Amino acid sequence: MEWHLAHSTDTPAGTVTWGSAGAGPPLVLAHGWPWSSVSWRRIIPALARSHTVYWYDMPGYGRSEKRPDQPTGLDMQGKVFAHMLTRWGLDRPGVVAHDFGGATTLRAHLLHGAEFDRLVLMNVVAMRPWGSAFFDHVRRHVDAFTALPPHIHEAVVRAYIDGALVTALPPEDTEALVAPWLDDAGRTSFYRQFAQADEAFTAEVEPMFGDVRRPVKILWGEADPWIPLARGRALHGLMPGSGFETLPGIGHLPQLEAPGAVLNALTGFLDG
């Protein structure tokens, strides 16, 4: 029941790799940027004891297809998420979304008709403004960054990932997060994500958050260096009836920084 990517399927944005494990009600995990489905590796075994868990690397990420002309913005990721639910034959799964997996799943639900049993939004990109000063700088100079020598590019990736964390990760987790971005296709795709980022894709759905049709729990690492706790509270305010829970001392990547705390927070809500 460990993390793996044993399958692949075609989507509107290219071929994606995916895995599943366990038995029970369906549960889909949606990763964010600059992560991949490997970011769920520490909690998949426990979740698979009570659910059939599905995960995939989004187009342009992890071990999924990366190509120069590939659309990988949030508009396309929402369509691909809805596509994957259809591919898996899931009518109303539970969903746990992290980072821009939040905007991805909300767009799938609010714009593309994807239905969920319940939804967990963990340190998500969902509201404007988003993106750091570095994020904006790279977006304005994508060609220059794409041309960086490999060792400099690797240093950028490592520093960027490290900037999301409050708690240091085991070395094997860090290497698993960094590795997909280091070959030629990964380097180009890494910077493509900056180029295709557009706050219009969250602005489009922000007025619709009150229309989310199923139970929602918002879970937030209180010490997130990227998306402040206040943003999580604001999101909670736009979703009447949603639950809200914080994880003290945890940064932007709770599922790897504190997997036990995340599992404790998910228990009960997912089975309710």
Image: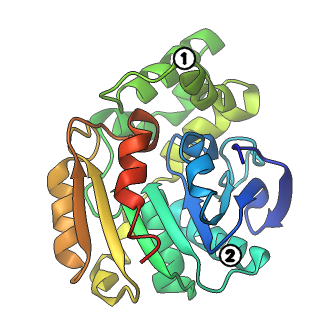
Is residue 216 at all visible to an observer of this figure?
Answer: yes
Callout 2 secondary element: helix
Q: Nearer the viewer, residue 161 or 76?
A: 161
Q: Residues within 10 Å of mark 1 (few under 14, many from 20)?
A: few
Q: Is residue 179 left or right of residue 177?
A: right
Residue at 46%, 84% in the rendered image: 110
Task: Please give the residue where the numbered disc 1 appears in the rendered image.
Answer: 171
Is residue 124 at all visible to an observer of this figure?
Answer: no
Q: Is residue 41 left or right of residue 103?
A: right
Q: Is residue 9 above or below residue 188?
A: below
Label annotation for residue 109: none
Cα–Cα gap, marks 2 and 1: 33 Å
Q: Is residue 216 above or below residue 169?
A: below
Callout 1 secondary element: helix
The percent coordinates of residue 225 (x first, y second) are 25, 36
Quadrant housing residue 106 = bottom left
Q: Is residue 240 left or right of residue 112?
A: left
Task: Please give the residue where the numbered disc 2 appears in the rendered image.
Answer: 85
Residue at 30%, 57% in the rendered image: 219
The percent coordinates of residue 88 (x first, y second) are 76, 74
The percent coordinates of residue 57 (x first, y second) are 67, 51
Residue at 44%, 54% in the rendered image: 98
Q: What amino acid does circle 1 point to?
A: Pro
Quadrant housing residue 83 = bottom right
